[in-house]
Amino acid sequence: MKIALLGNPNTGKSSIFNLLTGLRQTIGNFPGVTVEKRTGVINVSEVEHQLTDFPGVYSIYPRTKDEEVVYSALTNQQSTEHPELAIYVADASNLERNLLFFTQLYDLNIPLILVLNMWDVALKRGIEIDIEKLKNRFPDVEIITANARVGLGKNRILDAIKNWKASKRLENFIPNYKPASQDDQLKQSDEAKERFTKIRVIIRDVENENQIKLDTFSRKIDRVLLHPVFGYVIFLAILLLVFQFIFSFASIPMDFIDGLFVSLGSWFSDTLPKGMLSDLISQGIIPGIGGVLVFIPQIALLFFFISILEETGYLARVVFIMDRIMRPLGLNGKSVVPLMSSAACAIPGIMSARTIADWKERMITILVAPLMSCSARIPVYTLLISLVIPNEKILGFINLQGIVLLFLYLLGIVAAIVVSLLLKQFIGTREKGFLLLELPSYRSPRWTNVGINILEKVKVFVLDAGKIILAISIILWALATFGPSGRMEKSEKKLIQSSYYKSLSDNEKQQQLASVKLESSFIGIMGKSIEPIIKPLGFDWKIGISLITSFAAREVFVGSLATIYAVNNDSESNLKLIEKMRNEKNNQGNPVYSLASGTSLMIFYVFAMQCMATLAVVKRETQSWKWPIIQILYMGFLAYFGSFLCFQLLS
């Protein structure tokens, strides 16, 4: 069967989904739209069923692009996403609000299993629900209790699916009511009032009338975390702590992975017969793969912390406090979710802007989201920070490199704020936006959810980015190995005949030959042609080539440099990339990667739109090339002049 997982936001739908599917899940898009969906496989009595986790909504009526997916799937029986069975997840401690969407599904005659999740929270708050009375109110609905966060309820849900049989409700499938049109706000409002009147009667019948205990623990913590001053200080402190951890603890496994691929490249170079195949593997494929896998520890750590913030309920508080800052910028608190999502990747961040109902707020969010430093920038940042920023401690315990990484993230945030203020003046408004937000109770993280989230993100990084990086590494190797007919041979012959070459040691001769051949190759010609444009930024032609290739994906920058230096420094194949970069000298004999040029390059990557996939998604979301063109132009301007200013000041 096609089974839909439905419910309000913050009811534990994701926990139920992870509980039922484990690792048997994939992430994709709903047909024809860029709204993300998670699909998993569940096995019930040796029969496999497809479970789709739909976006959380409060009602069947859509106010955002995200919610239109739910409306279309449920009201159109011809839709490929129309479910044969729905599992509705409700917060047992807040049943009245949850029953609005549930009663709409019930009246649509969609076969239902009602899961009263967070049953333990309801009991702690003194709420007792009479399940039998609730079943009498909704015949043909399987009603079960669960506490998915600690793994309780899985077998009951699977048994309910197994015992569920197609009834006349499914055979006839005649809805008891037809939802009002999407534009008929008055009818929707009247229907909601009528439903809540009936729901309150049901609640009085099925719930006890004992005094409900308030969640005093969450309220006490919120007095501090939602404070108009201390709330922001605590948030910044948490960010600083996260980046300190990323630099302090990820370096050990990163050094191990880097050293492993250096040894692997050397082994292939020494073992295989000398020739093109040996060079392709040792100078192209292995450095390319190593350039991806070496950053897994940092990305895993980043998503570990993000998952914990989400699981504990703190992320919702961040949305709430940031609404105060967002309003004057032409945004609202809901913009924080896409912007924070963009810290992982701008693509899902831009897609999640569909939850913003106001067109102006949504457009501004989409246009500034790529300024948030995504995980693809981490490989670039960490490589350059390790290269040009001393590994020193401030006050004896604060890592200077971690502070620089935090500064780069904050610089992107400040840029997003300034650009939002400017866009607010130029983009016309269509309607007044608002923030509808529920603050969940604080709870301990469910480590299974955290683990699955980390695995999902690492998998996306390795497979999606890895395929691009590997392909570009092979192309770069070919462009760096071959050149126009006779050009490389002439350059090599000219060097050998020079008195300068004859005065060098054997090792230096080998390096000079490799360097001359690289400059005469196709990639060398391309790099030299753009060098005058990027020289004022402190970049040489090799960096320029990496800037061009990283437009496919930002993290390609590291893999590109790894390939270029692997070809250029064949005699130093046993050195790590960072050591090769540290040894790189310009024509004047000065280090290519100085504090000025390294910082300039970091600033460039903070602002530049180095991701063609993001531009494609912006075009898809806005249905116009106008906005992605504006985006690439203004971000390119910021990147070039920000980098230029930085290099000139530090030189």
Image (spheres, grey):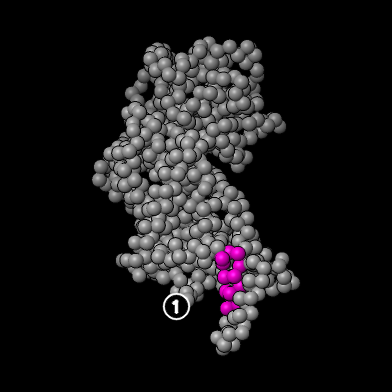
Give how far across and how far down residue 555 sits, in percent. 52, 56
The vertical placement of 273 against 474, above or below, is below
Q: Nearer the viewer, residue 520 or 353?
A: 520
Q: Is residue 597 visible?
A: yes
* Magenta residues, dominant SS class: helix
Residue at 60%, 61% in the rendered image: 476
Give how far across and how far down residue 355 sits, in percent. 43, 33
Q: Is residue 518 in the magenta section?
A: yes
Q: Which residue is mark 1?
A: 588
SS assignment at label 1:
loop
Q: Magenta region: which residues?
A: 510-525
Quick check: 400 left or right of 569?
A: left
Give how far across and how far down residue 62 sits, in percent. 45, 24
The vertical placement of 149 against 8, above or below, is below
Quick check: 433 left or right of 22?
A: left
Q: Nearer the viewer, residue 63 or 245?
A: 63
Please, what is the three-letter code of the amino acid marked with disc 1? Gln
Give how far across and how far down residue 71 sits, in percent. 51, 23
Q: Residues within 10 Å of mark 1 (few under 14, many from 20)?
A: few
The vertical placement of 529 against 37, above or below, is below
